[in-house]
Amino acid sequence: MSCRRLPGLLAVVSVAALATACGGKGAGGAAGAAMGGAGGAAGGAAGAAGGATGAAGAAGGGAGTGGVGGAAAQGWGACDLMPAPLPTSGTILELPIAPVLEGQPFVHGEPNVYSTGGTITPLNFRFYVSEVQLLTAGGGTVPVDLVTGDGLLQPYDVHLFIAEDAASHTPRVLAPPGTYTGVSFLLGLNAACNTPNANGRMAPLSATSQMTWPPIFGYLFLRYEARFSADGQDAGAGAAPPPLIIHMGGTPNTSSAPVIRVDGSLTVPATGSVTRGMRVAIDQIFAGATADIDVTGTVLPGEEVEAGERLRRTAAGLPLFSFAP
Amino acid sequence: MALRACGFVIALAVVLAAAGCGEGSPPPAPLLPLVDDRVPAGFPAGSTTTLAPADNALTEARAQLGKRLFFDKQLSRTRQVACATCHLPDHAFSDPNAVSAGVDDRRGTRNAPALVNLAWGEAFFWDGRAVTLEEQAGKPIEHPDEMDLALPDAVARIAADASYARSFTDAYGGPVTEDSLRRAIASFVRVLVSGGSPYDRHLRGDDEAFGEAERRGEEIFLSEKGGCFHCHPPGMLTNEGFFNNGSYDEGGDTGRQMVTNRTGDLGKFKVPGLRNIEASAPYMHDGSLATLEDVVDHYDRGGTGHPATDPAIHPLALSSAEKADLVAFLRALTDRSFLDDRRWIP
């Protein structure tokens, strides 16, 4: 109740009042954004995205906009409920994510036919998206703020995709107008957010995220649970049933969230909003979770944790996400 | 810093909303002593006051009015059943019977859940069919197996009771309506905060009442072997989700599926918070388990084994000593200061 309502509550407060109340670093960041967003972007992104480079001056038409500077000002090294000043300009880019299984829609809570025989009924599927960056033709990156449909900042600059909640399927960012070659993001949380204790945190980092783990273990980055039914069919000679539980993450300070890169042309207009659909391939998640990697001894015992660790190690190199055709 | 600042913003918004109620609205009543702003250990920031929706800001007058309504049998068709008939304060506002007796001794199919720390809740009833306390509050009044009284009729009865008139004016600025009736009851439920158990004190660093057995039990609770934390994360002890915990068997209550119609939601029920669980027996959605020992045995067996059971539910192979430690931990969730609080009683 608390966190879900936060954006709504904030919406009734004027932008000026919010900037004042949430001030401090935010107000300063806004000023910095207005004065030199691109430079701030470079500093802000550096080191935060696990290898993604800052994009000094590479923000295309968006250099100097509030959205770029906003994300840069926070530096992504922190995990604040209100992480950055309200962006003052930019276009809302919607990135609706649709789960697919072998190219077909993967319907939550319903049996989905699997090619090796039988059906998969997903029971719980959720993951974090954070540190979103737009990719530019010159090889640079433009960090952008995650926002609500109203353009308000997402708490902690983090989005939680929850399969059973259609309203959560669309991460939105405030993007400087321009043409981009793709998008990248963390499939999970940065180190500042991936702390071993959720106490006091609001959504999407509260215990009701279903991503918190006991103290010392931090947050899950991705949680997948399902039932598999052979439905009387033979799974095929040598065909293994799909993983039923995959828990990726949950080891703060010892593992980082994988950086996901999605390539594809992306044009952000100067006004209005724009939508670019994405897909997340469940079969690729299975591929990562069952990769031939020995993770014994590197994570806690447990099939679901080991499957998650294999996925974490391989995710960046797999086509987990793609733009919809 | 940011939390504090934005807490201020939320408070400001609430105040602005209250101020906008119009000419003639009564000034906000003092929030003490009934409204308790304690935040149990491990809960998200935000007191009961700030968690209340903008159109039902929490005040002393509203919570007191809700308390009176909660215990008022006029709200049932037969005038013999109140909310408190099935939600007994001494039992953490649950019912010691597996299923409660409504009007004309009609029996439902589900155990009356404890009403504890619901200010932080995100869905209500075992199947989550209400998403706010305000929405929840009216449904038992109208349910044929519970109080069986249409809300318009309930409003008429309360409106005819002159002793309520001043209270509704003080709380909501006018005579009783369906909205104000539900909002008042929700306000009372919202103040039922429990955060004084030995476990809460343990989380705050005071282990005087949290001994070795409790500590071992907590360790199992938080381990992959016990696996309890998957649904009952430390702190809140509920993730507010819906899971099939192995209580479902063929032909039984379909639970969450009644709300979503999803195949995968068969036999899923809301994960309850566990504070005061010792006082809220019997357990599970149908009250089918009489004791905490039965609950631990249920999970140790892996539930009923029905194919719809969540894949995380499987036999645990707990030893007798481990089971005893788990029960000791669960008993450490008992908050006597909550159970003995006479403010809840008219």
Image (tube, coloured by chain):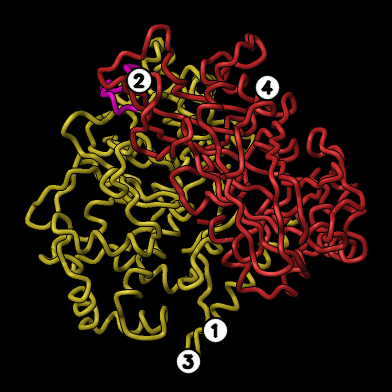
Chain colours: A red, B yellow
Prevailing secondary structure of the magenta residues: loop
Which residue is at 30% across, 27% downward? B246
Task: Give the residue type that dot 4 points to.
Answer: Arg
Q: Identify the disc placed on residue B134.
A: none
Q: Which element is circle 3 on?
A: loop
Q: Is any atom of residue B271 visible in this view? A: no
The mark lying in front, picked from 2 and 4, is 2
Residue at which label 1 appears: B20
Q: Nearer the viewer, mark 1 or mark 4?
A: 4
Q: Is residue A16 above or below residue B209?
A: below
Name the amino acid, label 1: Gly
Q: Chain of mark 2?
A: A
Residue A117, label in figure: 2
Type of amino acid at the residue the image marks with label 3: Gly
Q: Is residue B301 magenta?
A: yes
Q: Which residues are magenta?
A: B300-309
Frontmost residue, A133 versus B71: A133
